[in-house]
Image: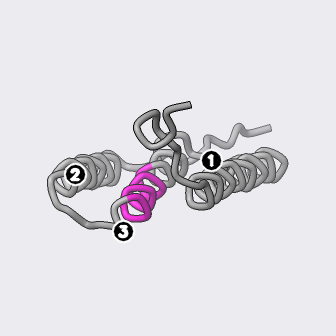
Amino acid sequence: MERVRPTRPSWPRLIAVGAILVLLALASFALSFVDLGRWALPLALLIAAIKATLVLLVFMELNRERSSIQLALVAVAFMLSLLVAFTVADVVTREPATTLATNPH
């Protein structure tokens, strides 16, 4: 019986994805100096999600794994998105904290 070797990403592809990751990191760093207002957090999360997806698919080769491992990845992504959504909802719906200056008692 002949062994079948799994195909690996080529070096040019790995270098290209690495360069894209560096560019996204630089873009994230540069955008930290720009006042984006309410769009700062969503844009930062979008850049982080793109970088994480590239690492998972290209360097960890999860697109070549069994479906059970891919399903586990989807479940983790869903739980993480719930965690982020609930955290953002908590922060947005909070009332301002009272200080001692406004309430001396």
* Of labels 1 and 2, the one closer to you: 2
Q: Residue furthest right?
A: 68
**Could you tell me which residue is drawn at 41 percent across and 58 percent down?**
41
The mark found on residue 62 in the picture is 1
User: Going 51% across and 43% down the picture, which residue do you hit?
Assistant: 98
If you read the primary sequence from the N terminus, does the residue marked by circle 3 or circle 2 appear first?
Answer: 2
Type of secondary structure dominating the magenta stretch: helix
Segment tinted magenta in the rendering: 41-51
Residue carrying label 3: 39
Amino acid found under the numbered disc labelled 2: Ser
Side of 70 relative to 7 (left or right)? right
* Residue 84 position in % (x across, y down): 62, 52
Circles 1 and 2: CB atoms closer than 8 Å: no
Q: Residues within 10 Å of mark 3 (few under 14, many from 20)?
A: few
Q: Secondary structure at mark 1?
A: helix
Residue 34 lies in what quarter of the image?
bottom left
**Which badge, 1 or 2, is on the more N-terminal residue?**
2
Q: Is residue 28 magenta?
A: no
Task: Based on the picture, tell me whether residue 42 belongs to the magenta stretch.
Answer: yes
Element class at badge 3: helix
Identify the disc placed on residue 32. Answer: 2
Q: Earlier in the sequence, mark 1 or mark 3?
A: 3
Give above or below for 43 relative to 26. Answer: below
> Mark 1: which amino acid?
Leu
Q: Label 2, secondary structure: give it.
A: loop
Separation of marks 3 and 2 at Cα, in angstroms? 11 Å
